[in-house]
Amino acid sequence: MGLIQDTLDVVRKRDANEPEFLQAVTEVFESIEPAIQRHKKYRDANILLRIVEPERVVMFRVPWQDDKGQFRVNRGYRIQMNSAIGPYKGGLRFHPTVNLGILKFLAFEQVFKNSLTTLPMGGGKGGSDFDPKGRSDHEVMRFCQSFMIELCRHIGADTDVPAGDIGVGGREIGYLYGQYKRIANEFTGVLTGKSVSWGGSLIRPEATGYGCVYFALEMLKTRGDSLEGRICAVSGSGNAAQYTVEKLIQVGAKPVTMSDSNGFIYDKEGIDAERLEWIKDLKNVRRGRIKEYAEKFGAKYVEGQRPWLVDCHCAFPCATQNEISGEEANRLISGGCFLVSEASNMPSEPEAIHLFTNKKILYGPGKAANAGGVATSGLEMTQNAMRLPWSREEVDRRLRDIMATIHKNAWETAIEYDRPGNLVVGANIVGFVKVADAMLEQGLV
Ligand code: NDP
Ligand code: 2IT
């Protein structure tokens, strides 16, 4: 369609050096074409050109001192993408590959994801090219404190509420929150993913992984199927992966792989609850490498490869963007895979998405399938505002309900726009329409 391609041309020219951002925008714009075609109001208001430009981008210097006393400098960012339906909301990523384009792609995805959750949250993302790997707790603390000295001017419980992402977990959120509190002299819900004893929500650590499995179960329900006895390939071994595996074990599935950036382990007996506890200690406390699992339990370790070589029924990418190529998608399908539920953001390359949708396997795109993390962050904000915590059961029930609603809305919208079963089209249109309508009602924003 002319307008969509014209807008994509503008973005391609303006943001030519941001390939991940262009990839995310192209996927969303091409899949919402039926809605743009059906509703003249979006064309008249040139809403695509407006929604693709961040409301605000902050970039800043983060100076810190390592344990040897050496002066170091990293680059910090916060992308405040869209606040049409609520305060900016989205995680912080600390990883050496972080740059403006990566964070813009993540912030853009976050806008539609947050809209899908049904909660009032705008979209944002931030982070730094700081690499926490191999750094002592003291170094991480000093870095977080320096990062927050600048970030604190731009955030607030009703303005912008960051959380974790790759390289930012409970430890980092603690240091960031402590520094914010010293500077602002107030105890508010300015970050989510906090510890339960000082304002965090039960189930928030579990939420991304649990939610991703709940979403898979919703997809399976449409075929009268379940995860019972299903062999599952999982990538990553961080927060999203650990709780995906935990829920898979609970629902009777058989997770057989996990990975990190060096390689993957294959345990054909299945990773059980006891072995998963060992992995949590390895990754969250000892901060070691997944290879050690193979040495400890006699499983197979494949260096330099991703888990998609393994025959499986279901795949749960939980590591990073572009972690399933077209070739790997082909391999997955020929190995018997009929379901992909994405806990990571944009894990499938465009060729892989085309294959999944053309072959009509059950495919849950990240912004729907991994929305449980940010949705539970929204529930943490609610509890902070009420100053009243909910029980584990209460939060888990709400998370389940939200994941079921996201699936239902995407499923029904795909039918409404003549793309039955296509949750990419369904989810992107649902996410887009709410934000676009809010922007139209708020005037030229
Ligand atoms: P963690 O930092 O806890 O874990 C990340 C995992 O992915 C690690 O095993 C890491 O391996 C691996 N990984 C990271 N980068 C790469 C890379 N470039 N190549 C290969 N492996 C890599 O992060 P999370 O589990 O929180 O995040 C994982 C994914 O889930 C991300 O895409 C994130 O955006 C998404 N997500 C996270 C949510 C959350 O609430 N945390 C919510 C929704 C989505 P290594 O240790 O070797 O780096
Ligand atoms: O990508 C994501 O949705 C997250 N990293 C979680 C964001 C949040 O605000 O909880």
Image (cartoon, rainbow, N blue to C red):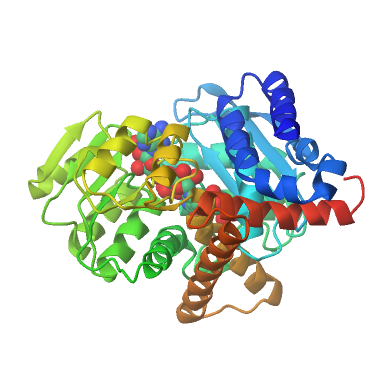
Classify the position of ligand 1 by quadrant: top left, top right, bottom left or bottom right. top left
Residue 227, percent from left and from top: 28, 66
Q: Is residue 157 left or right of residue 350?
A: right
Name, please, the residue furthest toward the right.
443
Which residue is found at the position 53% from the left and 62% from the top? Answer: 411
Number of numbered callouts drawn: 0
Q: Is residue 369 left or right of residue 413?
A: left
Which residue is found at the position 43% from the left and 51% from the top? Answer: 343
Question: Quadrant location of residue 223?
Answer: bottom left
Q: Is residue 222 left or right of residue 48?
A: left
Q: Is residue 45 visible?
A: no
Residue 176, percent from left and from top: 59, 49
Name, please, the residue furthest toward the left.
298
Residue 415, percent from left and from top: 57, 60
Query: Between 317 and 4, which is closer to the camera in this rendering?
Result: 4
Query: Between 240 and 75, which is closer to the camera in this rendering?
Result: 240
Which residue is found at the position 18% from the left and 34% from the top? Answer: 302
Residue 38, percent from left and from top: 74, 50
Which residue is found at the position 45% from the left and 46% from the top? Answer: 344
Vertical order, 205 against 39 (above or below) = below
Name, please, the residue furthest toward the front.
418
Question: Quadrant location of residue 133?
Answer: top left
> Which of the image's four quarters has the C terminus?
top right
Q: Is residue 380 left or right of residue 123?
A: left
Q: Is residue 435 visible?
A: yes
Query: Between 255 and 28, which is closer to the camera in this rendering?
Result: 28
> Which of the image's four quarters has the N terminus?
top right
